[in-house]
Image (cartoon, grey):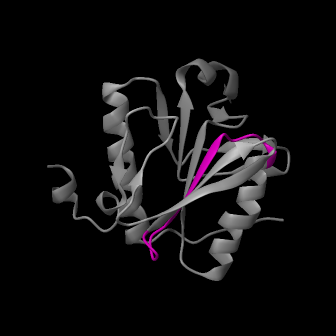
């Protein structure tokens, strides 16, 4: 089954930028891995995804990259969910199931319209929801020791406010 999505809107892209900036700044100070926006990931002959952002720890990079693509699960996958029930179903059901099946360690489903992040972590071959964070909450992950990001910093912030 082929799923094709229209180009993301500006709110999606601003949240993407904000996440890349926050995580990128952390990784500059703590070079524990690599962040890649919009990479291809060939999970099997019939399962190919292009997540918004992935993160891979340094020690895993050589074992999961081939032919300029990811060929195995990354440590973190982030999807910024586009508005609409079809998009939500694709990201929170179809991709969620795929990411669990192929062993992605953590999955963040970011929803611009509700200003929330649903965090899933791998348990066996299933991604289980561990928390849903709202705009006033702080996002932390064992993948990024010491990182704390207020969700308000990633939702609808003008670019010049983020850079200060």
- The residue sitting at 22% across, 59% down in the picture is 159
Compared with 91, 150 (above or below) is: above
Q: Position of residue 88 (x, y in %)?
A: 64, 73
Q: Which of 17 and 68 lies nearest the eye of the viewer?
A: 17
The reply to whether the magenta stretch includes residue 104 is yes
Residue 29: name its quadrant: top left
Question: Which percent across, then down, holds residue 109?
Answer: 57, 60
Residue 38 x, y percent position in the rendering: 53, 49
Residue 76 is drawn in which quadrant?
top right
**Residue shown at 70% from the left, 73% from the top:** 89
The N terminus lies in which quarter of the figure?
bottom right
Residue at 66% x, 64% y: name it.
91
Residue 17 placement (x, y as % from top left): 36, 54
Count of labels in the image:
0
Q: Which residues are magenta?
A: 101-115
**Magenta stretch holds residue 25:** no
Vertical relation: 81 (above or below) 95: below
């Amino acid at each position: 089954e082929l799923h094709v999505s229209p180009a993301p809107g500006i709110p999606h892209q601003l949240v993407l930028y904000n996440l890349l900036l926050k995580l990128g700044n952390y990784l500059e100070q703590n070079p524990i891995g690599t962040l890649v926006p919009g990479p291809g990931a060939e999970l099997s002959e019939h399962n190919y995804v292009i997540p918004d952002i992935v993160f891979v720890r340094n020690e895993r990079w050589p074992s999961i990259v081939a032919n300029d693509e990811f060929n195995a699960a990354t440590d973190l996958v982030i999807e910024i969910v586009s508005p609409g029930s079809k998009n939500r179903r694709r990201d929170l059901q179809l991709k969620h199931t795929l990411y669990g099946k192929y062993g992605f360690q953590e999955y963040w489903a970011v929803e611009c319209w509700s200003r929330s992040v649903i965090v899933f972590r791998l348990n066996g071959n299933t991604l289980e929801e561990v928390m849903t964070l709202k705009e006033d909450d702080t996002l932390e992950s064992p993948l990024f020791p010491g990182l704390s990001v207020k969700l308000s910093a990633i939702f609808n912030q003008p670019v010049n406010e983020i850079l200060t």
